[in-house]
Image: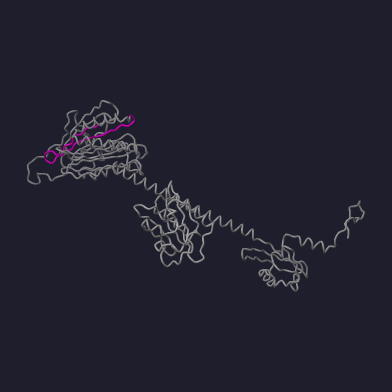
Amino acid sequence: MTARTPAGAGEPLTPTVPVPPAPALLRAAFEASTEAMLLCTSDEHLVVLANAEARRLVPGLLPGDDIATVRLPALSRATAENTDSFRYSDGGRCVYGMRRQLDDRHYAWFLRDHTDAHEREAALEIERSRTAFLAEAGRRLSASLHVRRCSRTIVELAAAHLADAAVVVLPAKRRQSAWTRLAPGRPVEEGTQREHRLADVPGLLEALGGFPPIPSRWLDAGQAPDWLFPAGLGPVGALLVVPLPGNAEPAGALILARFGAGAVFSDQDELLARVFAARAGAAVSAAMLYREQVDTTAVLQADLLPPELPSLDGFELTGSYQAAGEALRIGGDFYDVFGPTGDSTDTVIALGDVCGHGPEAAVLTGKVRQTLRALRLVQARPEAMLKVLNEALLQSGRRHRFVTMVVGSISRAEHGRVRLDLASGGHPAPLVLRNDGVVEEVPTSGTLIGVMARTVVHPAAVELAPGELCLLYSDGLTEARGGPSGGEQYGETRLRHALSECQGMPGAATVERIRQLVSDWARGGNQDDIAMLAIRAPSRTPLSLRGGGVPAASPYLITAQQGSRRTRARS
């Protein structure tokens, strides 16, 4: 047969090139196909033709073979069950088959090898699961800055995704190393181990030293000590020790174990463990750094927070302090009490307000308190304390920092009264609550401390009868903003009225009530530090009830500078 060249319209084709017979051409196309094809008879299911790709997929396949005996069980089974398709996976191979009827006497099987695609899908799925695991690890590890909680999270994640059991070992402190463990069928366990016992675990000292991890195949899992994993879990088949990188030094080590004789860690497993360990180490390192900062802050706060008030004979002391920030309990407001020393029997009190708030103001507050304590040792009077403190602040070079303060000395007077000698440096005047509900302002005043070289101080003295109270407070109390509009100050008028309603109440109850009223006014959101210090003369049974004839004495203010100011709050 020959091919024909085109001719004119209506003219027959002229054969020019010889063409092989049709069966030979079809056989050649059949053989060259990249898709595996089997041509079979419909009656006896015998293989008529099998191209090269089919012979590769089904080794040993020859024309004339019975389809039921070929070395592809899924193909034989699909033919026997008269199904038109099948899927076969075994030994890493994945083959799809589809049957098409050609005529009454023949049908064809089309086979496709999806092994490579299946491997790619499996690898993609593994990568997705690892990515999801690392994302979960990052989310959970970043949720806490607590070292023990981080260690528990690490072993939970590692035991769920990387190994059968996991142990986190932290660097030794005082020759003891803390560890956290999670093993099958057991809750998370914690404990400590002596530093010299860590060498019993293969590769652990190297990991704690920050050296690169030793491959699992180089570690003898049989050398794992008894304290590492509980008895009853079976022999450790594979062991992997990975360092937890930290900030300039290792944060610990992660020990992974798989149980059983055939257990191994593949190269991909070790790579994933190292990536996870890097994130875990960063979390533990951050938690350790946070713990160190908290410990340091606690030590500093111990000296900067208001002191615990002493129990003194003859009068009651009650203090209250609330910093503007909830996170840091220190600020610029303060109070302090210095008990009798040397030949002096007086007690010195101080309440002040350093410009600003937060850590910077708290540092200056600490310096002021230490200066006052030193002045107390030389038994300086309140007004002298303020003048010396003013000189000290001016010489410190802190021109933009000043202090307002009330300093006073407390002494016992006749008939159970308490005498207060007070001096103020630009601070709100103390208030006195009398037994009849009258609220008085102590007439003491003065210039700001740390601003001008010449300090003017006008001291005043006041006596408290039994049951009466003197309140020292910072301006954060009266300047607290809130109320119906949210921006109105609490003010001195409301403070006087609230103090008047505390008539007859103990000092602690009075201070707590005022604190609560101001907090309610500001709706719990203080914009400034608030400090209060109350001095109360203890109540006593009137002498008239015990048969005495001493008349009640009128309370009074003692001052040489200005007259007293008396106010009765109206309800």
Q: Position of residue 137 (x, y in %)?
A: 48, 53
Location of residue 109 with respect to 439 vertically, above or below: below
Location of residue 112 with respect to 498 vertically, above or below: below
Residue 413 is one of the magenta-drawn residues: yes
* Quadrant of the image occupied by residue 300: top left
Residue 141 visible in image:
no
Region of the chain picked out in magenta, as a range: 399-424
Location of residue 571 with respect to 564 vertically, above or below: below
* Quadrant of the image occupied by residue 327: top left
Residue 389 is one of the magenta-drawn residues: no
Quarter of the figure that contains the N terminus: bottom right
* Quadrant of the image occupied by residue 555: top left
Quarter of the figure that contains the C terminus: top left
Residue 228 visible in image:
yes
48 left or right, relative to 265:
right
Q: Position of residue 132 (x, y in %)?
A: 52, 54
